[in-house]
Amino acid sequence: MYTLHCTKKLLDRIKVSPGSSVSSPTTALGNWYATALFWKPQVALLVNERTLLPVLMPLAPASTLAARFPLAMASVLRGHGAPGTFIANEVAAMNEVSVAKTANRSVVGTMNEFAFLAEGYREDMDTLDLVALSLRLADTPCGALKHDYPQRLVRELVGAPAHWI
């Protein structure tokens, strides 16, 4: 179980009323934050609260975003070379999700910065490959992490070998 904290513009798109209480996550990565990027086609940007790992995925159909998210996250973790057992356990633990409004302004700030950078990376890399863009964003130093990198924090969390990047 985890909580998906959504911006108002995403809540309007997915047409879900946010819950009033937030449960403690049972996943290793914890809770996630999400917003909509109005690209063509529209994209959802999700950022992990604990590691600031970014995941870009198609927004449509918006009503199924929460159900489709674990597989998108798994693709990004595979792209980072995370162990298959960690990925399988994380996806299995994400079988239940609650939706809430955003609550952590630091994560929202990082999410806004990632949204800005993703637009630039998309143009610079000349790609619409959302996994490739997610991997590139994870290699961005984040002030909220004292200028550490999301990919490094994920590597430490999953206990990946030193050669994994």
Image (spheres, grey):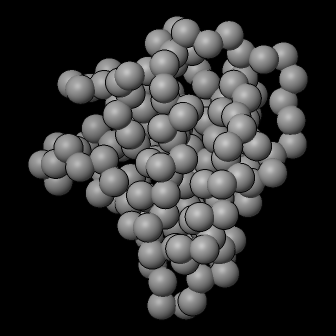
- Residue 13: x and y, percent? 47, 12
- Residue 82: x and y, percent? 52, 73
Count of numbered badges drawn on the protein: 0
Seen in the picture, residue 134 relative to 39 is either above or below; the reply is: below
- Residue 26: x and y, percent? 81, 51
Quadrant for residue 132, please give it. Answer: bottom left
Seen in the picture, residue 109 relative to 17 is either above or below; the reply is: below
Q: Is residue 37 visible?
A: no
Q: Is residue 7 left or right of residue 81?
A: right
Front-lying residue, 86 or 11: 86
Q: Is residue 1 visible?
A: yes
**Residue occupying image coordinates x 42% and y 58%:** 75
**Residue occupying image coordinates x 76% and y 43%:** 1
Seen in the picture, residue 146 relative to 59 is either above or below; the reply is: below
Front-lying residue, 90 or 144: 90
Front-lying residue, 137 or 28: 28
Seen in the picture, residue 130 relative to 7 is either above or below; the reply is: below
**Residue occupying image coordinates x 57% and y 89%:** 161
Quadrant for residue 66, please give it. Answer: top right
- Residue lying furthest left in this view? 126
- Residue 25: x and y, percent? 80, 46
Image quadrant for the C terminus? bottom left
